[in-house]
Image: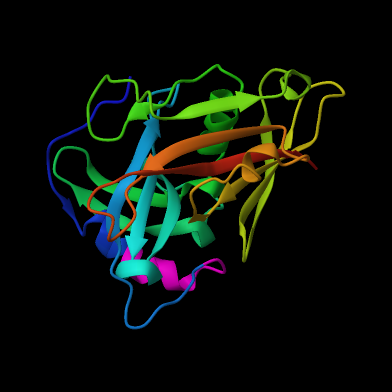
Amino acid sequence: MAQIHRTTMRPTKLELLADWLPTRAWYAAGPGAPRPVRAGGFRLDDPAGEVGIEFMAVTDGEGPDAVAYLVPMTYRGEPLEGADEALIGTSEHGVLGTRWIYDGTHDPVLTRQSYALLAGRAVAQHQSVSDAVDPAVTASLDAAATAGDAEPAGAADGPGGTDVRLLLPGDAGPLLLRFRRVLRPDTAEDRHEADVLGRVTAEWTPAGTGGVPARGTCVTVHRA
């Protein structure tokens, strides 16, 4: 289960994201510099116990023009080979030392565990409480798309988010794992998209709502 350390990080994750967000194809730029604020999220466990996995929701801006973003991140004790383009930055963790923080959609550990969550083989953990399941996160996957472990085979960023191609054993694949970077509350139409084989939904707190949470889809599965 996810272990949360009560300590410092220098620079903080939000400080790193303020510099990183404007470099992304899916960033919906607003007036002034980014001022990301934590708005929710959850964690997943790495079965090997080596990589931290966090899905963070952040808001940028104020009032009705504020945008909520999904930022999946991985935290590693050493650089991930071949992933320089996915590096958000490095930070000094008060307990664990230097941490290399990556855009998790380009990290195979996060994408494998995202598929495991969809397939019912992993459980979402609370973002800020150790050893606690997060019941607000739901995941489902069509039985026809559930076929053992998935192997990521490349990720691509675009205006709508990040697509990760997944290879499955036998004749079950490939699939497309789509991370929706701009978060919006689900509508009835969203919940009945014909080409969606599975989805992860979660809650976040939009700006200017007085703490009232919203719920929407953050990850979907499609035929590649």
Q: Quadrant of residue 149?
A: top right
Residue 168 in the image: state x and y as whole percent. 75, 27
Is residue 206 left or right of 107 when viewed as pictured? left
Residue 68 in the image: state x and y as whole percent. 41, 58
Tag count in the figure? 0
Is residue 159 left or right of 224 when viewed as pictured? left
Asked if residue 23 lies in the magenta stretch, the reply is: yes
What colour scheme does the image use? rainbow
Is residue 153 left or right of 53 when viewed as pictured? right
Question: In the rendered image of this protein, does residue 100 appear above or below residue 63?
Answer: above
Q: Quadrant of residue 139?
A: top right
- In this picture, which residue range is highlighted in magenta? 17-26
Along the line of sight, the residue nearer the viewer: 180 or 177: 180
Quadrant of the drawing holding the C terminus: top right
Is residue 99 left or right of 151 when viewed as pictured? left
Q: Residue at x 40, y 59 (%)?
A: 88
Q: Residue at x 40, y 67 (%)?
A: 20
Q: Residue at x 57, y 24 (%)?
A: 116
Residue 174 in the image: state x and y as whole percent. 80, 35
The residue sitting at the bottom extreme is 32
Residue 157 in the image: state x and y as whole percent. 62, 60
Question: In the rendered image of this protein, does residue 213 appear above or below residue 15?
Answer: above
Along the line of sight, the residue nearer the viewer: 78 or 219: 219
Asked if residue 162 lies in the magenta stretch, the reply is: no
Magenta stretch: dominant SS?
A: helix
Along the line of sight, the residue nearer the viewer: 65 or 162: 65
The residue sitting at the front extreme is 188
Quadrant of the drawing holding the N terminus: top left
